[in-house]
Amino acid sequence: MNSPVYDVIIIGAGASGLVCALECARAGKKTLLLEKDALPARKILASGNGRCNLTNARVSPAFYHANPELIARTLEKFSFEDCLAYFNRLGVLTTEEELGRVFPATGKSTAVAEPLKLAVREAGAELLTEREVIRVKRGKTFSVSVKQGDTYQSKRLVLACGSCAYPQIGGTQSGYELARSLGHTLIAPRPALSALCLKETAASRLTGIRAQVRLSAFQNNQLLDEAEGEALFTNYGLNGPAALNVSSAVSRALKDGNVTVKLNFFPQLKDPQAFLTSRLETYRARRPKDFFAGILHESVANLLIDFIGLRKNVPVGEQTPNTLSRLLQTPAAWPLTVTALRPWNEAMAATGGVNTREINYNTFESLKCPGLFITGELLDVDGKSGGFNLHFAWASGFTAARHMPEDK
């Protein structure tokens, strides 16, 4: 018995795959959604520490490492307001928190994943789990073979396989290989939204301490990226939102050598050096530890005192000129050396992936293989922390489905 020819097969039941399947089925297309794991939407369930930060009120091309034209066109078709309305129609009640982050009002990611899966079933899409795709071929139709032995046929194919980030919850290299087999080229995937490993072991003295900072990343004196927010010191380096939000640019640069990050412990001040100069004039008689009292965490102050080379029992006004120069500069630009990012199993996203020059920015259809669409994390697109990656996943799946031609 011949298997049916589907209008569209979507590989991957993550964020972009589920939205794409829903919209294809709603448009009357015979839709098959294949998921390699037993449970769909695993990354949705894990996102936002299990709360699912599904979008951000500030979403714009500025929050992505990607071709800005691609992001701009995508957001024109699926804006922040469109995203809120979309999930509201699915029955999801949302709430906006600080920095524009949007979560389900229940505080649980199941409030996003379950309504989405229910809508896919109700629209008539066929969802098959534990179907790991191992090969795709393009002939008169797409032939999709799974590890379990079955082969499926479709007129159109969507690769929504996700990236290799978080392999413990489904991240895989398989989507890259499928895209390559259909003629696409890859930008080497590297960890993103991942913590930074530092060369300076002395920084581990601050393990567990959190500080509000502005973190700037440089290579060869060229600014790569900067972010403001909380930094968490760890036994290996730096974590927290500020570190995560420069990690993509750092990750791309590390292939060319180490990266310097500079920490400004006074991000709220327009001119930290002027502030410290004034403070020095006021408190010249204080010892270094007392000079920093009230403006720096005690452990941070102690480490900077050692780094700067201040003599601990000598008033700051009596330190050497070179030491005073470092005192005025270092707390607002403490240089540390990044040697690597944490491994894939700690990376929330990937930078790199399918080269976006090879897709139509208006439709997400391949320019290499007609009838093939590529969405979500599989593409060389990654956003900052705060709901931007999920927004792109929803938006790309939605756009691909809405721009899939009707069969004649």
Image (cartoon, rainbow, N blue to C red):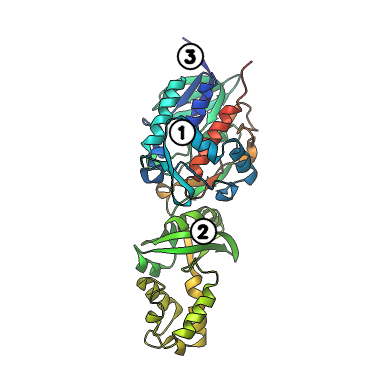
In three-dimensional space, the C-alpha distance between marks 1 and 3, rounded to whole angstroms, equals 37 Å
Work out which residue is located at the far bottom of the displayed protein and give it. 318
Q: Is residue 255 visible?
A: yes
Q: Which structural element holds mark 2? A: strand
Q: Residues within 10 Å of mark 2 (few under 14, many from 20)?
A: some
Q: In the depicted view, which residue is nearer to us: 266 or 288?
A: 266
Residue 27: image location, x then y, percent: 55, 21
Q: Amino acid at mark 3?
A: Ser
Numbered tag placed on residue 227 in the rendering? 2
Q: Please tell me which of labels 1 and 3 falls first in the chain.
A: 3
Q: Is residue 290 left or right of residue 317?
A: left
Q: Amino acid at mark 1?
A: Asn
The quarter of the image holding the C terminus is top right
The residue positioned 61% from the left and 31% from the top of the image is 365
Residue 288: image location, x then y, percent: 40, 82
Q: In the depicted view, which residue is nearer to us: 111 or 6?
A: 111
The residue identified by callout 1 is 88
Q: Which structural element holds mark 1? A: helix
The residue identified by callout 3 is 3
The residue positioned 38% from the left and 81% from the top of the image is 290
The residue positioned 46% from the left and 88% from the top of the image is 317
In three-dimensional space, the C-alpha distance between marks 2 and 1, rounded to whole angstroms, equals 32 Å
